[in-house]
Image (spheres, rainbow, N blue to C red):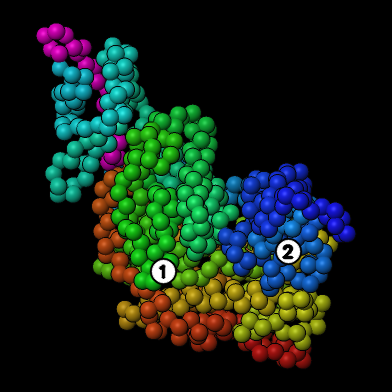
Amino acid sequence: MDKSGVRKNPDGKCIIVFKPSGKIVEAEQGTLLLDAAKRAGVEVQTPCGGFGRCGRCKVQIEMGEVARRQGPHLTQAEIERGVALACMTVVKGDVIVYVEPKEVTRLAPPQETTAEKIALPIACEWQRNPRIRKYFLNIEPPTLADATNDFDRLRRELKRQAGVDNVFASLQVLKNLPTVLRQDEWNVTAVLESDNTDNGNGSQPSRLINVQSGDKTKTSWGVAVDIGTTTVVAYLVDLLTSKVVDIASAYNGQINAGDDIISRIIYSQRGDGQSQLQAMIVKTINDLLIELGGRNRVKLPEINEMVVAGNTTMTHLFLGINPKYIREEPYVPLTTHPPIVRASELGIRINPEGGIYAFPSVGSYVGGDIVAGVLSSGTFQSGKLTLFIDVGTNGEIVLGNADWLITCACSAGPAFEGAGVRNGMRAVPGAIEEIWVNTETYEPTYRVMGNLPPQGICGSGLLSSLAELFVSGVIDKGGRINRALKTPRVRVGEHGAEYVIAWASETQHEQDIVLTEADINNLVRAKAAIYAGFSVLVNSVGVTLADVEQILIAGGFGRHINIEKAIQIGLLPDMPWDRFKYLGNTSALGAYTTLVCQDMRLLANEIAAKMTYLELSADNSFMNEYTSALFLPHTDTTAFPTVQSLLDSTRERLALSGTSVET
Ligand code: FES
């Protein structure tokens, strides 16, 4: 023991006890607390991937000696209380650490819809044309007079009874064939994967992916998966009826390696980070399959095909491709058209021979999820000038119609998902999802998901706070909090000016929930990046935002966007509300359409080829547009007439009350 009461082992080993779980690990002196927690199986929130950028991996050192790197995310009071960032702290001796249980990521994310409500927004002609076909065959057993081998015998019957020619199979399928053929007196079901698209290449060979004894043609299953950076959604689809039978969703298991794609790419470059990330997403998908299979009494090997749609980084990581160059100029992915792979190659627990088709992408930052969205939303065949936007961890935007499509990606960052915001959190029970500010007293009223005491603020709550504080005059158009207001809600905290949304006595963690000026800056930067993206796209084709006839909003955050408030802060253009339409998870819908109608793959390829990608970092006008949008709602308030009239009344009210403020 040293004089602080901390034991220092002569062999340099330290015992680390994690509370409240009671898990214990032994580690070398100098081990990062975050690594020790991982080894102990203790979950710590790491939105930035453990790079000291987000301040969300806070733990409490209850006893023992540690060394921490200084950073901006801890206040002096927190340091004195023993709070440390797990990713910036190393152990020097035996330590007892308290880690707040991470309920948030254990909860399944809110389900966006139910299977009965799945409806395709596309208006184009499509029909059932799955790649998976099943044929029940009654085969003549071999005799001395007809000693044709087993596989040729099966192929002969496929041609004779089902008209299918040119069939091949892997060694694995062939190995099982002799037993299966003889199990039920040569009555078998052949499961074939066939390319029946009219792609001009004539008849393609069909792959035999399974042979089952007896008649198994009464069911046929496939799965469509949207691999989001935050959330993964899987649809179980009956390929005989094309119906979505059930939906399951979960947080992407990679969340612990960072909230955004850049953090994930950085994580993938550390040691075996890439294979860890692949294992995490494979596990997430397998868990969803187990959930769907259990609920619907479907054995996983009876699922014969999977279609996935995800951004380019998610697709690379899922397929085990190094995403390194996506992040390095000139931002080149390995491929925009990944080949079909077999489930066994990835460890996905459907039929091991089942094919996995990943949507084609446009480039590094406009991925298969956006191609799937443009497909399922019908943007690619619309007669109207359409702006399709998907605001998630990043903002991807497509402008166009049936004749042309142009696209860009804005690195808005995950601020609207609660990352980089002091009291930000995901949209789960306990999150403040909407706020109203009284324009006389500046007192807030808020609504909390699950009707619980609040724990933090989720994306829609942040958007709502920003808009309400702005139109009520608490913050000005530069995002500064008006310190002259006579309300205890406005104060100067350790990180500068802040507005108290909930007092400690109201909250779950008994600490005030605040929105700081730094948070406001992060949110304004995020909205400015998205709005600048709109502006650059419309300018590049010589039209204006007023010419846009419809705005289709997709993605998880889109579901919670309050159009009125999004216009008030200048995230969305000031247009009549009937031009906005929320479409839901268009990425999952695109994957689903492609699963039930293989002709959609040809369309997906056409869409990906048709989309012109505009690299914003190489566009000279982007910086100007971005700078102009760094104000609420914008430097050009004439583009926001409805917001301007609200601001005029705020200005009058403040003048009457004798408060000095610039709105
Ligand atoms: S600061 Fe530690 S994980 Fe982000």
Q: Nearer the viewer, residue 18 or 472?
A: 18
Q: Residue at x 41, y 50 (%)?
A: 320
Residue 583 quadrant: bottom left
Q: Residue furthest left?
A: 145
Q: Residue at x 43, y 75 (%)?
A: 533
The verdict on residue 9 being magenta is: no
Q: Nearer the viewer, residue 552 or 374?
A: 374
Q: Find the magenta span and give its range.
A: 129-147
Residue 138 point in image, percent of width and height: 23, 17
Residue 30 quadrant: bottom right
Specify few, some or many for label 2: CA neighbours under 10 Å numbering under 14, 14-19, or 20 or more: some
Q: Residue at x 18, y 47 (%)?
A: 198
- On residue 328, the disc is 1
Where disc 2 sits, the SS reads: strand
Labels 2 and 1: the sequence-earlier one? 2
Q: Is residue 132 above or below residue 639?
A: above
Where disc 1 sits, the SS reads: loop
Task: Tell me if 25 is positioned left or right of 141 in this view.
Answer: right
Residue 146 point in image, percent of width and height: 13, 12
Label 2 belongs to which residue?
A: 67
- Residue 610 appearing in the image: yes
